[in-house]
Image: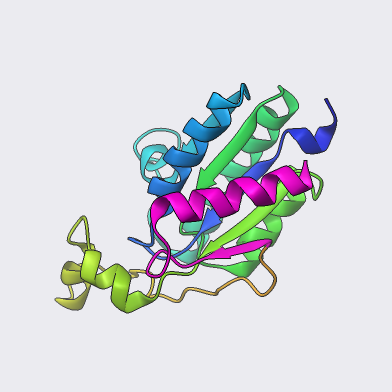
Amino acid sequence: MTVAQHPTVWLTGLSGAGKTSIALALAQALKAQGRAVALLDGDQLRHGLNRDLGFTPQDRHENIRRTAEVARLMNGAGLAVIAAFISPYRADRAMAADIIGAAHFIEVHVSTPLAVCEARDPKGLYAQARAGQLAQFTGISAPYEAPLAAALTLDTGMLALDESVGRLCRHLQQRL
């Protein structure tokens, strides 16, 4: 297998955009193809490896740095990695790409509009942020810098989950 056959698919987008749903379905699809896959989810890592980090820009940077280092190690061990993180800053995603390596890093923008994400609000976070109960909440009181040149863009407000995963699988087949 070549290096590029062990990618890190980096899903970035607002809370509620559908990153985790896409990541889970993509992992299942890749496993069905016989690929070894690891899933790194922002919420899960914040309960373990990154539990000491908050949501300041510095803490967000460190969250992404640690995750990229783990993804790089997993790619080196022969795993495809799916990383689902808001990762709101372009500079942090560029750092992740540098750590992981251009041959491995595939940035996917889950570009679901704020209004759709807020209407979904699966964890009630947007309501809390609008009420002033959550500081530095991405899309409300903290910025989200959309990718300028993502490898693929998926709007789950317009695409069903299976359509999003299908597009992503086709993109991966072309790259690998």
At a point 59% along the width and 51% down the height, the residue shown is: 168
Q: Is residue 2 left or right of residue 12?
A: right
Residue 122 is a magenta residue? no
Relative to 62, residue 30 above or below:
above
Q: Position of residue 30 (x, y in %)?
A: 57, 32
Q: Is residue 83 left or right of residue 55?
A: right
Instruction: Tell me if 102 is positioned left or right of 130 in this view.
Output: right
Query: Which part of the image, by quadrant, shows the C terminus?
Result: top right
Report the magenta residues as a range.
Answer: 151-176
Q: Which quadrant, please, contains the N terminus?
A: top right
In depth, the one of 38 and 168 nearer the eye is 168
- For residue 150, say whether it is visible: yes
Taking the spot 33% from the left edge, 60% from the top edge, the residue there is 16
- Does residue 100 appear left or right of residue 122 in this picture? right
The answer to whether residue 140 is visible is: no
In the image, what residue occupies the spot 54% across and 25% down? 32
Whole-percent x, y for residue 132 in the image? 18, 75
Residue at 45 percent across and 76 percent down: it is 143
- Nearer to us in this view, 148 or 160: 160
